[in-house]
Amino acid sequence: MATLEIRDLHVSVEAENGPREILKGVDLTVKQGETHAIMGPNGSGKSTLAYSIAGHPKYTITSGTVTLDGENVLEMTVDERARAGMFLAMQYPVEVPGVSVSNFLRTSATAIRGEAPKLRTWVKEVKSAMEKLQMDPAFAERNVNEGFSGGEKKRHEILQLELLKPKIAILDETDSGLDVDALRQVAEGVNRVHGTGEVGTLLITHYTRILRYIKPDFVHVFANGRIAESGGAELADKLEAEGYEAYTKGGVSA
Amino acid sequence: MAEAQNIPAGSTTAGSIAVAAESTVATRMSAPPSFDVADFPVPHGREEEWRFTPLERLAGLHDGTAVATGSAIKVAIDAPEGVIIETVGRDDARLGRAGTPVDRVAAQAYSSFETASVVTVPKETVLTEPVRIAVHGEGGTAYAHQVIELGAFAEAVVVIDHTGDAVLASNVDYLLGDGAKLTVVSVQDWDEKAVHVSQHNALVGRDASFKSIVVTFGGDVVRLHPRVSYAGPGGEAELFGLYFTDQGQHQEHRLMVDHNAPHCRSNAAYKGALQGQDAHAVWIGDVLIEATAEGTDTYEMNRNLVLTDGARVDSVPNLEIETGEIVGAGHASATGRFDDEQLFYLQSRGIPADEARRLVVRGFFAELVQKISLPDVEERLLAKIDAELEASV
């Protein structure tokens, strides 16, 4: 069973007056089949965690380890991480002018699977995945994220999640900026992938709203660059009632 | 109708649509068209038509100091049966009929060439194989004139291939008889020091169709001036272009479509990729719809993809309309970047960095490459794009 292990992870970014530490010792284990929700206030370092694990060049790992089934993820290039089974659904997916969604998906699937998917089955696979997310077939001919609405961008991320079948999926605020219908469609997509039992999910969110549709096995409260508290789904209810105040006023307990 | 997005620092993309009683497209030039170089003052670089061009890199083509050297270029023409190839003197009546030089270098070329080559496809002759014209620079300076004439209802594809090293100023005339169909692919695949300044004049006959595909890769400075006017109603012109501008290169494409006859169509689409310090691409798209040109349908588009920092694009579409009785008129210009975030996004989907870059650039050019419909040219083009990208990694 695939396992992502994060141990004492410290991460800095380059700021105006030198490096600034954002992650201050994160410990977390995510196993295939599990869903972990990471919740926390703005600026607590949730997105930094997501992007550092994916290998964004902006972030410098100063200490700690990230391993996937014992393999050192931090030594891999961004594309090697993806091919090893990591996936990051981004909060702000970027436009890629000149590259159609269909070309992008196929190139990506070819890279991840190690061989080009057979055209006939591939077309069916994409079509059925798009139908489930209620995406118009014409979508495939548009350029990646170009002129997409917020909801379209997020559904496109989940479409990739469904097609690329990673071992570990990190969803960075996939729920933000979505109306209720889009939120439900996105959540259904995440649940379908979860239902295969093949993916461990790290769901990063600011709001408890998405947890009405996606039931986490574990909830972690993120504050000041580390996990301040961990618990089951009931922790989300507590956050819903009380907010993050207890964690942001120096009352952090590791 | 003009759109601009995500413009890299230092680049411009401007556009205008003017409805004017008097043509500003024509009057923006510093002198009226003329065959005589003496009618044009030596440009200083501030003139509208020269302000983007590095004059100091023109090897004297603009100020009369560039003297032709013997056998600077070698021209080889390979044509199927039925095509007439001639070398003619300056007084041949077919020269200069398609258009008049509009700037000093074109006039210098017209005033300085000694012989011209004329390729004629007689009327109603339909070629099944392309005419291939290889222009190879042997080092040195040359002034040239070429005429490609299609008789009524003739059909031909002409591929003009520029390679080697030269300083070349030329005028190329395309004369299309009524109902003729001409596709011209002009490839600028020069060595890195070459300077190439050329005016292309197409005179499109009644119901004739002209398709121009300009592909510019090489050279130090390439400045092309593809121009179209119509000899009668019902003509059609498609102007497609692809360029890949590398570090230090200046590639300038200045289009002018003069809708001077009713019920004609034009469609211009140019796309360029840029990479490296001081890569500079300039695209000017002038379209003039004259008062007599009722029923005109025109669209022009320029897209640029900036792959690295340090490159610059100036893209200026101008549409000028003197009659409201038209089918359609529009333009679009946009410059976007391929940046680290795009690279990260594609890589995070398992795609290696070099493949990500290739995917984006090939995708960007794909729709235009498909319009060439000459497999050997398409393949060479794609190979060239890949080679350019590899050189940058």
Image (spheres, rainbow, N blue to C red):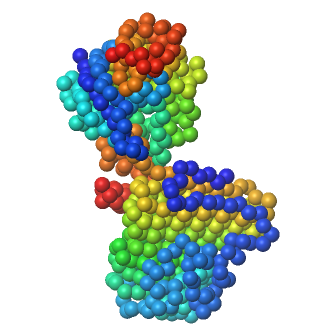
For residue B289, what is the image quadrant?
Answer: bottom right
User: What residue is rendered at 37% in x and 9% in y?
Assistant: A231
Residue sitting nearer the eye, B166 or B117:
B166
Q: Position of residue B214 (x, y in %)?
A: 48, 66
Q: Where is B132 relative to A241, above or below? A: below
Q: Is residue A69 left or right of residue A32?
A: left
User: What residue is rendered at 53% in x and 60% in y?
Assistant: B11
User: What residue is rendered at 22% in x and 36% in y?
Assistant: A75
Residue sitting nearer the eye, B268 or A238:
A238
Which residue reaches farthest left? A70
Q: Where is A84 relative to A198, above or below? A: below
Q: Position of residue A101 (x, y in %)?
A: 46, 37
User: What residue is rendered at 40% in x and 28% in y?
Assistant: A45
Q: Is residue A100 left or right of residue B255?
A: left
Q: Position of residue B268 (x, y in %)?
A: 58, 60
Q: Where is A97 relative to A22, above or below? A: below
For residue B365, what is the image quadrant?
Answer: bottom left
